[in-house]
């Protein structure tokens, strides 16, 4: 079979289409870059993405958000930045989990302390009827359980305990 210029151009055209499709699939969305930056505590990237128009309250198909990722990994600077960007401290996932619940389950005491200081409601429950204290006890995070118990007492400052 003899290739003509027409055949060669068609092959090049389809190869270019394939390359474009491949790049589109592998290119991360702004939301995915924000989630990655939040899980890594990359506050410079978070700042750039939010300033360029990425909604910091947007959630992915699993209802993960930047604040939930930052809380899960204990990235307190990222948590501060996201809260200052307007993300509600008690935002909810599909299963009604909050950033405080994520930090609690992952054993991130510094994130738990920060979220409580910033007004997180430790009494909120998820779809299984569990609150942050229940989750801390289930996961064996006794330091977090103690902190949450102390923080729920009136006129107490668990950070000073």
Image: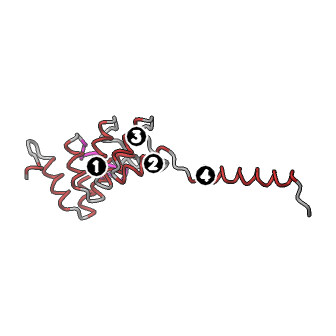
Q: Distance between the residues labelled 4 and 2?
A: 16 Å
Q: What element carries label 4?
A: helix
Are the residues at dot 1 and dot 4 in contact (C-beta closer than 8 Å)?
A: no
Other residues around mark 3 within 10 Å, as few (<14) / some (14–19) / many (≥20): few
Q: Left or right of 60: which side holds 144? A: left
Q: Distance between the residues labelled 2 and 3?
A: 11 Å
Q: Mark 4 or mark 2, which is nearer to you?
A: 4
- Residue 23: assigned label: 4
Q: Farthest residue toward the front? A: 5
For the magenta stretch, what is the residue range?
120-131
Using the rendered view, name the quadrant where residue 56 is placed: top left
x then y, percent, for residue 6: 87, 51
Q: Mark 2 or mark 3, which is nearer to you?
A: 3
Q: Mark 2 points at which residue?
A: 33
Other residues around mark 1 within 10 Å, as few (<14) / some (14–19) / many (≥20): many
Q: Mark 3 or mark 1, which is nearer to you?
A: 3
Q: Which tag, 3 or 1, sits closer to the chain's start?
A: 3
Q: Which tag, 1 or 2, sits closer to the chain's start?
A: 2
Q: How far apart are marks 1 and 2 (CA)?
A: 22 Å
Q: Which tag, 3 or 4, sits closer to the chain's start?
A: 4
Q: Mark 3 points at which residue?
A: 48
x then y, percent, for residue 31: 46, 45
Are the residues at dot 3 and dot 1 in contact (C-beta closer than 8 Å)?
A: no
Q: Mark 1 or mark 4, which is nearer to you?
A: 4
Residue 28 inside the magenta-drawn segment: no
Q: What element carries label 1?
A: helix
Q: Distance between the residues labelled 3 and 4?
A: 23 Å
Q: How far apart are marks 1 and 4 (CA)?
A: 36 Å
The residue located at (15%, 47%) in the rendering is 151
Q: Is mark 2 on a helix, strand or loop?
A: helix
Q: Mark 1 points at which residue?
A: 100
Q: What element carries label 3?
A: helix
């Amino acid at each position: 079979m003899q290739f003509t210029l027409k055949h060669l151009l068609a092959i090049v055209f389809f190869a270019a289409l394939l390359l474009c499709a491949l790049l589109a699939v592998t290119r991360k969305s702004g939301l995915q870059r924000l989630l990655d930056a939040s899980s890594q505590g990359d506050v410079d990237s978070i700042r750039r993405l939010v300033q360029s128009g990425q909604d910091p309250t947007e959630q992915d198909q699993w209802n993960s958000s930047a604040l939930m990722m930052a809380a899960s990994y204990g990235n307190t600077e990222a948590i501060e930045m996201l809260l200052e960007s307007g993300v509600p401290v008690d935002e909810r996932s599909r299963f009604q989990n909050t950033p405080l619940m994520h930090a609690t389950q992952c054993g991130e005491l510094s994130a738990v302390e920060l979220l409580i200081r910033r007004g997180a409601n430790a009494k909120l429950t998820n779809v299984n009827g569990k609150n942050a204290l229940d989750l801390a006890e289930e996961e064996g995070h006794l330091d977090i359980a103690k902190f949450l118990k102390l923080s729920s007492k009136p006129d107490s400052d668990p950070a000073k305990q």
